[in-house]
Image (cartoon, rainbow, N blue to C red):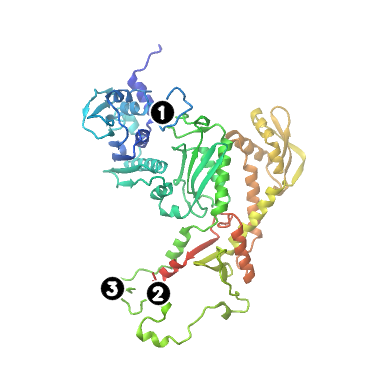
């Protein structure tokens, strides 16, 4: 069969299969073009989940007639010089507009600053329409109708209109987080209007618009730099977690990405602090020199490759753990919200239910309570002794009264409930501590500190285990042999394609040493880091801590409870146990007053 040159339309349709997978892909490309044009206001309208209509309006720099003719041709772009390694814009390939035009009805109207009128060009199923004058404001209006009408087979692979509309919403949210100074409006007949006003340089305010105010209350700021790579953003405290990873956002040089390396590092940073099946909430932004990251891995530009993946992984894990150690040891506000909901009484019945505003038995206002009885009929009770819950009226082993100090965030112990929960009074509220979960975390941290401060004891194998591996895997394992030795795993080369295992960590007892080494080889091949052995040791330490900590049902003396509180304040990660459950819940005085109708 003779070789022939494909037509330009067919080439564009093939490219569209890679660049434009679904309506959300087209929306992403058009929004990126608007941002590269310097837009500060972007409006997106959709219908039929983006398949029937996708319109993007921006107030960017705009294009003249000559630029419009080039914009719809393949590999024509204003964003790239001759250096493919120096990419500082979101788009650069020059494929999006011609790809969309080859499978849809595309219209572009634009007017640059200072021009008396605008211009319009159309591409219908790959057929170019002539440029003509158009009435349009400064900026650009891109309208895509009947997406994939020229390739109807692709429509069979589209999801429901609701699913496609949701995917476009996710694209807009990611772009809104990356560019807080830009106003985004998403509307259409298939959705309710979604608007993100500009927040200027206040990135946390924009994140709160997207993820909700709860994230603002439970986020720790991250700002770290290592060898020219800088990581900024916000990470939720471990007790503020979700059942899926949809609220994890990553950006590289302002570009939203879905990168396996970043997600793996995020999971490792929260290891032993979040329950199995739960996911942290985080917004991470990496800023690196364009020369050390390759964004030209895939036409969709959602995958990236780093020149030094170990540096990036270490930066993410170290920065998050340091931030958590400095400011993440606190209970999430969702715990207090759940406690409030549990205490909240049922709503009054419609036929004459109790009303705080009309009942003669309504609670006194907070300021009136400070002055004494507020109503005349109650004045006779002013001289009577009132009931007291003072600790001195309890059994001899009751808690000695102590005042919470400002330097003690967890306050002073006041009582122990059901031999498992410590109630402590803080300066502005109260804290309820799960004594078993809290002590379990403290024991685990002590064990882990011991593991990290000295080499792990090793036991020699009577007969060394020989494992056959590809030569590249052997080379990678031997290059990390010194690190493995510190963890109690002794390996050495046994010919060109084999490894001899001579020692294993004594803490692990009988184990599948061959399986462990194969796992380490796979980790090194993918990430250039091997954390499987350290994770096993951490898991063992967590198990030992669980069985060796204060059990539920044990009655504690006052000094023991206060000592536990002080140790929690001094221990990183004490806000959650080894399984990721919260160790304490904090309730502010204002919340308590709301429960009793005082505010």
Q: Which residue is mark 3?
A: 351
SS type, badge 3:
loop
For residue 92, the mark is 1
In this view, the residue in front, 116 or 238, is: 116
For residue 367, the mark is 2
In this view, the residue in front, 457 or 519, is: 457
Q: Residue 415, can we see it? A: no
- State the image quarter where residue 488 is shown: top right
Viewer-side label of 2, 1: 2
Q: Position of residue 106 (x, y in %)?
A: 28, 29
Where the C terminus falls, by quadrant?
A: bottom left
Q: Position of residue 43 (x, y in %)?
A: 30, 40
For residue 313, the mark is none
Q: Position of residue 369 (x, y in %)?
A: 41, 77
Where the N terminus falls, by quadrant?
A: top left
Q: Earlier in the sequence, mark 3 or mark 1?
A: 1
């Amino acid at each position: 069969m003779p070789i022939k040159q494909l037509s330009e339309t067919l080439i564009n349709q093939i490219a569209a299969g890679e660049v434009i997978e679904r309506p959300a892909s087209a929306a992403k490309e058009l929004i990126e073009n608007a941002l590269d044009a310097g837009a500060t206001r972007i409006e997106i309208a959709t219908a039929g989940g983006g398949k029937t209509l996708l319109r993007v309006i921006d107030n960017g720099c705009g294009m003249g007639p000559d630029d419009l003719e080039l914009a719809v041709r393949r590999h024509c772009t204003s964003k790239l010089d001759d250096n493919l390694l120096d990419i500082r814009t979101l788009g650069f390939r020059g494929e999006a507009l011609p790809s969309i035009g080859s499978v849809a009805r595309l219209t572009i109207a634009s007017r640059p600053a200072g021009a008396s009128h605008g211009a319009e060009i159309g591409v219908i199923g790959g057929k170019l329409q002539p440029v003509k004058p158009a009435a349009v404001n400064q900026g650009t209006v891109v309208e895509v109708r009947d997406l994939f009408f020229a390739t109807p087979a692709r429509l069979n692979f589209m999801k429901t209109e609701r699913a496609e509309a949701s995917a476009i919403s996710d694209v807009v949210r990611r772009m809104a987080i990356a560019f807080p100074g830009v106003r985004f409006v998403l509307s259409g007949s298939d959705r309710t209007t979604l608007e993100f006003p500009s927040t200027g340089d206040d990135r946390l305010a924009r994140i709160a618009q997207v993820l909700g105010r709860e994230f603002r209350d439970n986020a720790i700021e991250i700002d770290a730099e290592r060898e020219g790579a800088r990581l900024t953003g916000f990470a939720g405290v471990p007790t503020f977690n979700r059942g899926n990873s949809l609220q994890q956002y990553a950006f590289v040089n302002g570009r939203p990405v879905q990168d396996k390396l970043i997600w793996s590092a995020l999971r490792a940073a929260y290891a032993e602090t979040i329950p199995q099946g739960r996911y942290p909430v985080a917004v991470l932004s990496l800023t690196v020199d364009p020369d050390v990251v390759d964004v030209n891995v895939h036409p969709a530009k959602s995958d990236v490759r780093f020149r030094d993946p170990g540096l990036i992984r270490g930066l993410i894990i170290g920065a998050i753990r340091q931030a958590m150690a400095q400011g993440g040891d606190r209970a999430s506000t969702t715990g207090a919200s759940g406690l409030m909901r549990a205490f909240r009484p049922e709503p009054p019945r419609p036929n004459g239910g109790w009303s705080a505003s009309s009942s003669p038995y309504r609670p006194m206002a907070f300021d009136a309570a400070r002055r004494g009885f507020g109503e005349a009929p109650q004045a006779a009770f002013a001289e009577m002794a009132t009931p007291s819950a003072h600790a001195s009226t309890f059994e001899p082993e009751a808690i000695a009264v102590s005042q919470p100090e400002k330097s003690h965030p967890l306050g002073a112990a006041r009582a122990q409930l059901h031999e498992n929960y410590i109630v402590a009074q803080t300066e502005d509220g109260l804290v309820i501590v799960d004594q078993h979960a809290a002590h379990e975390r403290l024991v685990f941290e002590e064990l882990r500190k011991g593991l990290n401060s000295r080499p792990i004891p090793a036991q020699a194998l009577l007969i060394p285990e020989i494992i056959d591996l590809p030569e590249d895997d052997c080379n990678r394992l031997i290059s990390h042999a010194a690190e493995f030795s510190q963890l109690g795993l002794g390996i050495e080369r046994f010919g060109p394609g084999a490894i001899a295992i001579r020692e294993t960590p004594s803490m692990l007892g009988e184990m599948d040493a061959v399986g462990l080494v194969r796992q380490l080889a796979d980790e090194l091949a993918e990430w250039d880091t091997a954390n499987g052995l350290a994770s096993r040791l951490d898991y063992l330490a967590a198990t030992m801590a669980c069985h060796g900590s204060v059990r539920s049902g044990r009655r504690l003396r006052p000094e023991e409870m206060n000592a536990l509180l002080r140790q929690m304040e001094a221990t990183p990660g004490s806000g959650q146990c080894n399984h990721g459950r919260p160790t304490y819940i904090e309730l502010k005085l204002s919340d308590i007053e709301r429960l009793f109708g005082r505010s």
